[in-house]
Amino acid sequence: MRIAHIIITHKNPSQLERILRKMQHPQFDFYIHVDKKVDIEDFRYLTEISGVKLIKNRLNCNWGGYSTLQAMVSSLKEVILSGVNYGFYNLLSGQDYPLKTNEEIYSFLTQNAGKSFIYYETENTEWWDNAVHRFQRYHLTDFNFKGKTFIEGLINKLLPIRKFPFAMKLYGGCKSSWWTLNKEGAIYVATFFVNETRMNKFLKFCWGTDEFIIPTILLNSPLKDNIINDNLRYIEFPEGMANPKILGVEDMEKMRSSNMLFARKFDTAISSDVLDALDASMPSLISKVPTGKR
């Protein structure tokens, strides 16, 4: 079974190179989406690494904007249409890093071929209480014009609260952006966005859609019983912060004891020591990998 790793990135090609070389495996392929705002030439040399391809349909990604979700879904579609038969589609960022060996990662996925892994919370949780404004209000995050903030405020003052366009129970969370979908789940998500143009129009004016829309689609689908509430990633959000912590050597014990396959977020410009420490400890990471059970 082959695995497609889709990596969303916008900076630091040398750090991305380190991930790609670390994760070399005969059954792994890598598809890199480089933010369209960034010079692609800085990343082109990465295709010299075995199994690495650049996503052709590049999009401008704005933090919190629908454009980020579009880049993820568009990349997923491109990989599905590549003609290669993949058993899993694993979405990573250029600031992720594995916590398990490639063989452990591959073994875990082959043993859980019928499942998809994504983190989610249900409605009426603290996260959702703070997140409903993402779709109830109009957000102009992907627009760039003078007076945008004023116009956005005026629109929300004059127009009624927006309602979600489908009769769906909502799922999502601060760690929901990154997922590992089996073939059936990946095709379902890609097909949904092709067919449901009403959803695309609605999401264009939402904020942070990548943290709630894909789990919502899957958990309201016939595939819901195969969705595991676990995205296989160690991510730490400091209380009250919208961005995850940049992990360092001081986080080694928590990462190692988490039993996750991957961790984020790393930045070698701040500290590369933590990646050196992970590399050094990798042979000893032989604890039981996640079971894939609900």
Image (cartoon, rainbow, N blue to C red):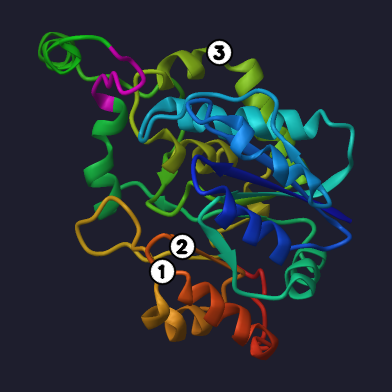
Question: Which segment did they paint magenta?
Answer: 136-144
Relative image position of residue 175 (x, y in whole percent): 43, 54
Relative image position of residue 64 (x, y in whole percent): 35, 34
Estimate how packed mark 3 is, as few (under 14), some (14 to 19) or many (20 or more) residues with alpha carbons within 10 Å.
few
Q: Nearer the viewer, mark 2 or mark 3?
A: 2
Answer whether labels 2 and 1 touch (C-beta < 8 Å). yes
Q: Quadrant of the N terminus?
A: bottom right
Q: Is 239 displayed left or right of 95 in the figure?
A: left
Q: Amino acid at mark 2?
A: Thr
Relative image position of residue 203 (x, y in whole percent): 42, 22
In the picture shown, does residue 62 fall above or below 131? above
Query: Label 1, on which residue?
Result: 271
Q: Is 131 displayed left or right of 57 in the figure?
A: left
Query: Label 3, on which residue?
Result: 197
Residue 118 shows up from this direction: yes
Looking at the image, which residue is at 40% across and 79% down?
Answer: 251
Query: Label 2, on which residue?
Result: 268
Q: For residue 110, which numbered disc appears in the image?
A: none
- Please tell me in which quadrant of the rendered image residue 289 appears: bottom right
Q: Which of the two labelled residues, at mark 2 and mark 3, occupies the earlier sequence position?
A: 3
Q: Amino acid at mark 1?
A: Ser
- Please tell me in which quadrant of the rendered image residue 132 appears: top left
Q: Nearer the viewer, mark 1 or mark 3?
A: 1
Relative image position of residue 146 (x, y in whole percent): 19, 9
Looking at the image, which residue is at 46% across and 23% down?
Answer: 166
What secondary structure predominates along the stretch shown in magenta?
Answer: loop
